[in-house]
Every structure is written in C-alpha cells, then in structure tokens.
Amino acid sequence: MSDRERAFQLLDAVPDYKIGYVVAYLQGMTAGEETEEPNAETLVAFAEGDKMLAEGIGQRYTNTKDLFADLED
C-alpha cells in the first residue's frame, strides 16, 4: 500500500468533528506550493508602505490599544 493510499484510509477513519484540523494541517503543508501574484492595488499599497518606511513617515504604534483608540476617533 502506498503512503497516499494509507493517508486516504486514515482520513476515512477521522471523525467528522476533527476533519477541520486535518484540512488546516494539509493547507499548512501545501502552503507556498501555489503562488498568487498580487493585484495592482496590492502592489500600490506595498510601494506606499515601502516609501513610508524609507522616509520615516506615518503613524507608528507600539501596542494595539493605541492603534484601536485612534481607529475609533
């Protein structure tokens, strides 16, 4: 029996309530196998972030409490 066949056999024995864990694990194992190209809007946002870092501009936060406080204003 191949490893793939054994994996299918084991998967059939996994209870339905645990399938989510198996799916999450498999997604982690295959991450990076398929590469997605960022769209134009994302590339513009990356460039904006790079510029802000290079020029030292923009608001910086040391904790999430301050970040969310500013978002509420």
Image (cartoon, grey):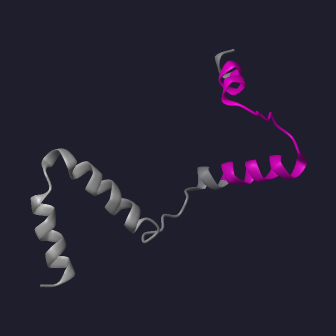
Left or right, 13 with respect to 70, comes to: left
Q: Which residue is drawn at 15% across and 63% down?
A: 11
State which region is magenta. Answer: 44-70
Total tally of numbered discs in the picture: 0
Q: Please check the rendered image and state whether residue 17 is part of the magenta-colored stretch, yes or no.
A: no
Snapshot quadrant of residue 5: bottom left
Above-or-below relation of 46 to 59: below
Principal secondary structure, stretch drawn in magenta = helix
Above-or-below relation of 61 to 11: above
Farthest-out residue, top: 73
Q: Residue at x 14, y 70 (%)?
A: 8
Q: Which residue is drawn at 19% across and 71% down?
A: 7
Above-or-below relation of 7 to 65: below
Residue 39: image location, x then y, percent: 55, 56
Residue 17: image location, x then y, percent: 18, 44
Quadrant that contains the N terminus: bottom left
Residue 12: image location, x then y, percent: 10, 61
Left or right, 24 with respect to 13, comes to: right
Residue 46: image location, x then y, percent: 68, 53
Farthest-out residue, right: 55
Left or right, 52 with respect to 73, comes to: right
Snapshot quadrant of residue 64: top right
Q: Residue at x 82, y 37 (%)?
A: 58
Quadrant that contains the C terminus: top right
Left or right, 25 with respect to 13, comes to: right
Q: Please check the rendered image and state whether residue 65 is part of the magenta-colored stretch, yes or no.
A: yes
